[in-house]
Amino acid sequence: MKSKLTVLLVLMMSLVLFVSCKKKEVKAPAEKAVNIRVQAVEEKALRPFVETIGTLNPNEEVIVSAEVDGILRNVNVDNGTAVSKGMLLAVIDDTDYGLEVKRAEAALRQAQAIYENTKLEFGRKQSLYKEQLVTQQQFDDVSTRLSLAEADVERAKAALLLAKQKLIKTRIYSPLSGYIKEKKASAGDYVKNGTNMFVIIQNNPVKLNFTVTEKDVGKLKKGHDVIFKVDAFPGREFKGKVNIIYPSLEEKTRTLQVEALVPNPDNALKPGLFAHVILYTGSERNTILVPIISLLYEGEKVKVFVVEGDRAKERPVKTESKYGEMMEITEGIKEGEQVVVVGQQNLSEGVKVNVAR
């Protein structure tokens, strides 16, 4: 009996030892790594800039109108015609205005003759008056007629000048160099004083009008450099300088209008073209850059994840300006660190990562 109990006890102890060994062989589950991609943080020497969209406009746009009534005898330009300052654009029939000049000249000659005769009479009567050979009334009468004759001469001169001005205005000249944007009248038309006849635009230089957001207003200064591209000339870059900074923001959009002047000697740039604008707001400086896609936003806070060894580390950062697909970082990260650009949404502090190559 005792031998049976001994055998049973040995078997039970063996079983316990076997189970215990089996338990020791069970391993803890392996930690799963999150697959990610990374990109090195860069430091580059860059000029700070603001990106925006703009529109090209003519430097000047004027409406040329008729200043006298009449029938258009000649029109020397058409839409798109290049014109120089002082170029003859059109002529209004001047027959009536030429006759008016002749009438005014005749009236002036008559007034001058009367004045000269009255002046001689005044001289004679003045001598006689001094010798008391004419009355005070007679002397006063000739003095009055002399003053009236002098006034008539001045009036005739003014009438002649006015007639000559009207005659001159029958010939319509360009007030500036540029191009005819629109011709509104043709030969044979009857025009009146104030009738719009031509729209002339000046395209050299051209104006580049664009807006900047409220947060960038403090960076603006007159004379800042602007570069831009237009779809009409792929690969070609144009340059200008800020000329006008408008005094107030647009209330609805909270943006500020800015204008730059751009040289256009070959007339390649046309008013109405859209422009992709880069406005430089300072001198070149060293800038820490990370891809915009690496940034995570939590309310007003911004963070990125970097890789240290095989672990993800959370870094709060401060952002500044956007440069294309990159964002400037002023605090929280340094050059050479590996920032996570794919998979960062699945990370938390200290999580194991697997960097895909």
Image (cartoon, rainbow, N blue to C red):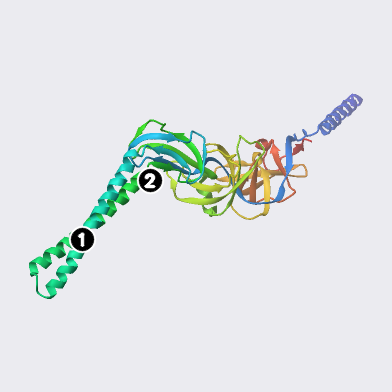
Q: Position of residue 330 (x, y in %)?
A: 64, 52
In which quadrant will I find the N terminus? top right
Residue shown at 43% from the left, 35% from the top: 74
The answer to whether residue 149 is left or right of residue 39 is: left
Binning the other alpha carbons within 10 Å of mark 2 as few (below 14), some (14 to 19) or many (20 upward) gives some
Q: Position of residue 267 (x, y in %)?
A: 58, 41
- The Cα atoms of the two marked residues, 1 and 2, are separated by 33 Å
Residue shown at 23% from the left, 55% from the top: 111
In which quadrant will I find the C terminus? top right
The answer to whether residue 225 is left or right of residue 96 is: right
Q: Amino acid at mark 2?
A: Ile
Q: Residue furthest right?
A: 3
- Element at label 1: helix
Q: Quarter-wise, where is residue 268 in the image?
A: top right
Q: Position of residue 58 (x, y in %)?
A: 50, 42
Q: Nearer the viewer, residue 165 or 290?
A: 165
Binning the other alpha carbons within 10 Å of mark 1 as few (below 14), some (14 to 19) or many (20 upward) gives few
Q: Nearer the viewer, residue 44 or 329?
A: 44
Residue shown at 38% from the left, 30% from the top: 188
Q: Earlier in the sequence, mark 1 or mark 2?
A: 1
The answer to whether residue 34 is left or right of residue 97 is: right
Q: Position of residue 109 (x, y in %)?
A: 27, 53
Q: Residue furthest bottom?
A: 131
Task: Kindly identify which residue carries mark 1.
Answer: 117
Q: Nearer the viewer, mark 1 or mark 2?
A: 1
Tag on residue 84?
A: none
- Element at label 2: helix
Q: Amino acid at mark 1?
A: Asn
Q: Nearer the viewer, residue 124 or 162?
A: 124
Task: Kindly identify which residue carries mark 2.
Answer: 168
